Image: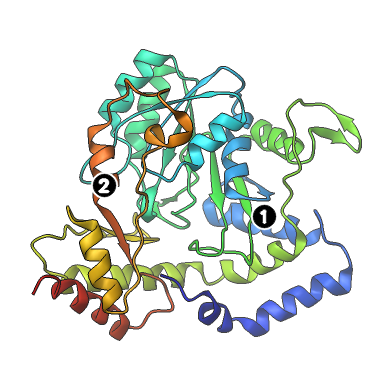
Amino acid sequence: MNDLAAQDREVAGELAAALSRVLDRGRYVLGPEVSAFEQEFAAYCGTPHAVGLASGTDALALALAGVGVGPGDRVALVANAGGYGTAAVDSLGAMPVYADVDGESRLIDPTDLDRVLAATGARAVIVTHLYGALADMATVTGLAARHGVKVVEDCAQAHGAGRDGRRAGSFGDAAAFSFYPTKNLGALGDAGAVVTADPTIAERVTRLRQYGWDRKYRVALPHGRNSRLDELQAAVLRVKLTRLDAGNARRSALARRYGSAIAHPKVELPAVTGPDHVAHLYAVLTEDRAGLAAHLRAHGVASEAHFPIPDHRQPAVGDRYAGTSLPVTERLCRQVLSLPCHPGMSDADADRVADAVNCWGA
């Protein structure tokens, strides 16, 4: 599904120089590399503020805390995005309430979100830009304003996706990014960030990432944690940020190639049409996922289901959501299968994958 070593090999010299710079300086936590990356990434996203954190899940949790979510609050979100949003909500003692997704976009369905917000009195909504596709933020932010709820964008799969001159992360009250190694902008380990236009949210997240301190050893905010982006990862991300747009363009080109080359009556392809989709994953749908995956494996092609179990049907929640019906979400989770799509692939690689899909059942 990915060849991270090959992708990193292309910038090995720059990465080595960046890491050496940190080692020579001898400062490893919350130093000049983190500050520089925060400034550069905020500028890239089109927001005044970015706060570097230890992971994408922490970024979601602290973004929610930054907009005022706390114990007992309800947070609306989708259930087809791998459980990371639910984990962040649970970590704050808040309660997830789920909206269904649109069958075509596979993103949050504004009509169902409207219903959920009206019925639950949610304090915030997490809008996940899944697979690299930017959600309908104009409609969602309009609904949020009408219901008086805060909007947190989950941009873990959408670094650089844009619409009408704005990039993912600049539409909501706050946004969370993951820099897990497989992301469009990936570190050499776990890392994350919150971006926002609101200085109060930025200050709150900055305090919460380090125990809630307003100065050393003085806890000014409750429920803080240790979630600091380290200098080594920040230095790596600074190198890779300069290549993000080129990597996104390559992903999109591969997705378009798949769209032209794959033609199988039992395989539904995603719509990857413009800059609002950066092709983090190329997720097809089929009613026989196991059969297609086995066929691809036999032809030497990797695949993976993103994501097979909806959040409200995870074993850990028991019958907590027994009365929750999300028919589109549940269908997509049964059918979704991701094909390889990353900047290290050649056109020939993509053609090989497409040929393998097309000969399924032949």
Q: Is residue 138 visible?
A: yes
Horizontal side of 70 relative to 3 (left or right) equals right
Q: Position of residue 258 (x, y in %)?
A: 23, 71
| Amino acid on which disc 1 is placed | Gln
Q: Position of residue 348 (x, y in %)?
A: 29, 85
Give the label on residue 190, or none: none
Q: Quadrant of the N terminus?
A: bottom left
Neighbor class of circle 2 (other Cα within 10 Å; few <14, some 14-19, many 20+) is: many
Q: Quadrant of residue 329?
A: top left
| Image: 232 above or below 309 | below
Foreground of the two, 217 or 31: 217
Outermost right residue: 217
Protein image colouring: rainbow
Residue picked out by circle 2: 334
Residue picked out by circle 1: 39
Q: Earlier in the sequence, mark 2 or mark 1?
A: 1
Q: Residue at x 50, y 42 (%)?
A: 84
